[in-house]
Image (cartoon, rainbow, N blue to C red):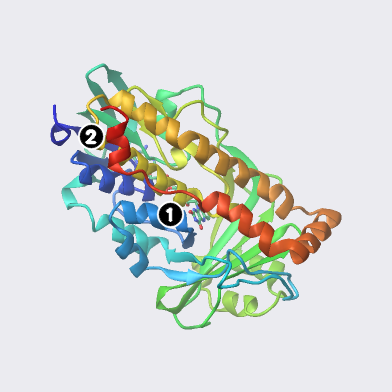
Amino acid sequence: MTTRDKTALIAGGGIGGLAAAIGLRQAGWTVTVLERPSELREVGAGWSFAPNAVRAADALGVGEEFRAVSVPTEAGATLRTPAGDYLMRFRHERDAPLLANHRADLHRVLVEQLPTEVVRTAAEVTGVEQSPRGVTVSYQTPAGPRSAQADLLVGADGIHSAVRQAVWPDTPAPVFQRILCWRGVTEPGAVWPVEGFQTWGRGARFGAHPLNHQRVFWFLTIRQDDPGVRYHDDLAEVLRRVGGWHKPIPALLAATPADSVLCHDIFDLDPLASYVDGRVAVLGDAAHAMTPFLAQGACQALEDATVLAAELADATDIPAALARYDQARRPRSQMVARMARQDPKISLSTNPLTYGLMTSLTRLAGGGVAARKTARLWDWSPPSRRENAEKGE
Ligand SMILES: Cc1cc2nc3c(=O)[nH]c(=O)nc-3n(C[C@H](O)[C@H](O)[C@H](O)COP(=O)(O)OP(=O)(O)OC[C@H]3O[C@@H](n4cnc5c(N)ncnc54)[C@H](O)[C@@H]3O)c2cc1C
C-alpha cells in the first residue's frame, strides 16, 4: 500500500485537528475530520504563539497565512506591577516577540487550507474499535449513529477527549488547577496602539496582546479554590479586581463589550503513559492539556501535528510510525505541561512573601532568567522527511 492509499480519521476540528489534517494531506493521506458542533468555528478570544509554533506552522506550509493574521506582541518579556512599574521590559536585541492573533482568524486560515469535504460537522465521536487492519470510529449525527473505518485515528478532541477515554479508559480525569480565567477583546481602534504586557498582582495576573484590526486581547487569571464559581457580570467583576491598575488596563476594560467576556476554570491533565495505541494517536489538549501560564498549549498542538505528519509521511508500518511520534513528542510536551503546572504555584501565589520575593528577583535578574527559561521552551525545530527516511522505513 502506498501512502496515497492510506486513510485517516481525525476526531476534533480545533487547531490541533486542523493542523494534523493539513500535515497528513500534504504527506499524501486521505483525511476526514469529525467535528462535534454543527458549525465549524472557533469561539474564544485571542492567544499568542512562540517561535517554536511559528516554525511548526512553516513546516505545515501555513506560515505565511499564520503571519498574515498575527501581530507581534511584547507580552512575553514586559512584566509590570499593578502600579505600572516595570519588573522587566522587552528588549529587541535580547527578546523575541510572540505572535498574537484572534482564535477565529487563525481557525479560518486553517479551515481554508482544507477542501470542504474534508471536515464533517455535527459528528460527535463516541467510540473506537481497533483491529490489526484498521480502526472503526462510531459517531453521532443529527440523523442518528454512524461509523467510519480508516487506517489511522487521530484524537484531537480536546481536554475531555472521547478518543482518549475510549482507548485509555483508566486515564484520570482532568485536574482543576485552582485557577479562574477571564478573557476579552476590545472594540477595533478603541485603545490603540498597545504594546503587549503582563502585570503581576498578588494572586492575579493580567495580560494584553495587540491583535489585527487594532483590537486588543486581554486576560485575567486569579486563584480560585473551587471550580464552577461564576459571577453575574464578568466585566464588572474584572473591573472590581483590576480596574484600579495601571494604564491602559482600565481603558481596555472600558472598550470591551460586556457580553463578550469569557470566563473559564483552568484544568490540565496528569501525564499519560503513552500518546499512542496501535493505530490510534492523541495530540494537542487530548494528549497534554496544560495551564495557559506559558502560552504553549496550542504551540505544542502545532508541534504534535508537524511531527505526526513527518513520521507518517513515508511510513508503511503505521503502529511503528506512531511509536516514533510518541517517543518524539511525549517527553517534550510533558516537560512543558509540567512547567505550566508549576509556574502558577509561584506566579499566582497569594502569599505576600512569595509575591515580594518573586517581584524582587524578577526586577533584579528578570531578563536573563526569563530568556533562559523561554529559550528552553522555544528551542524546537520540525523534523525533516529525510530524518524520517533515515530511520529505516
Ligand atoms: C484561557 C486560555 C488561554 C490560552 N492561551 C494560549 C496561548 O496564548 N497560546 C497557546 O499556545 N495556547 C493557549 N491556550 C491553550 C490552547 O487553547 C489549547 O492548547 C488548544 O486550543 C488545544 O487545541 P486542540 O485542538 O488540541 O483542542 P481544542 O481546541 O479543545 O479542540 C478540540 C476540538 O474537538 C472537538 N470535539 C470535542 N469532542 C469531540 C468529539 N467527541 N467528537 C468530535 N469532535 C469533538 C471540539 O469541538 C473542538 O473543536 C490557552 C488555553 C486557555 C484555556
Give percent across and percent down for residue 108: 30, 60
Give percent across and percent down for residue 326: 42, 31
Residue 178 vertical position relative to residue 212 in the rendered view, above or below? above
**Quadrant in the picture for residue 126:** top left
Q: Residues within 10 Å of mark 2 (few under 14, many from 20)?
A: many
- Residue that mark 2 sits on: 314
Circle count: 2
- Residue that mark 1 sits on: 53
Q: Are marks 2 and 1 in contact (CB under 8 Å)?
A: no
Q: What is the three-letter code of the residue carrying label 2?
A: Asp
**Quadrant in the picture for residue 196:** bottom right
Q: Nearer the viewer, residue 342 or 366?
A: 366
Among numbered discs 2 and 1, the one appearing first in the sequence: 1
Residue 240 vertical position relative to residue 347 in the rendered view, above or below? below
Q: Is residue 268 visible?
A: no
Furthest residue toward front:
390
In 3D space, how far apart are the residues under numbered discs 2 and 1 (Cα atoms)? 23 Å
Tag 1 secondary structure: helix
Q: Nearer the viewer, residue 286 or 229?
A: 286
Q: Is residue 330 left or right of residue 359?
A: left
The C terminus sits in image quarter = top left
The N terminus sits in image quarter = top left
Residue at screen point 68% across, 50% down: 344
**Quadrant in the picture for residue 138:** top left
Q: Is residue 313 left or right of residue 242?
A: left
Residue at screen point 61% across, 40% down: 338
Give percent across and percent down for residue 224: 69, 50
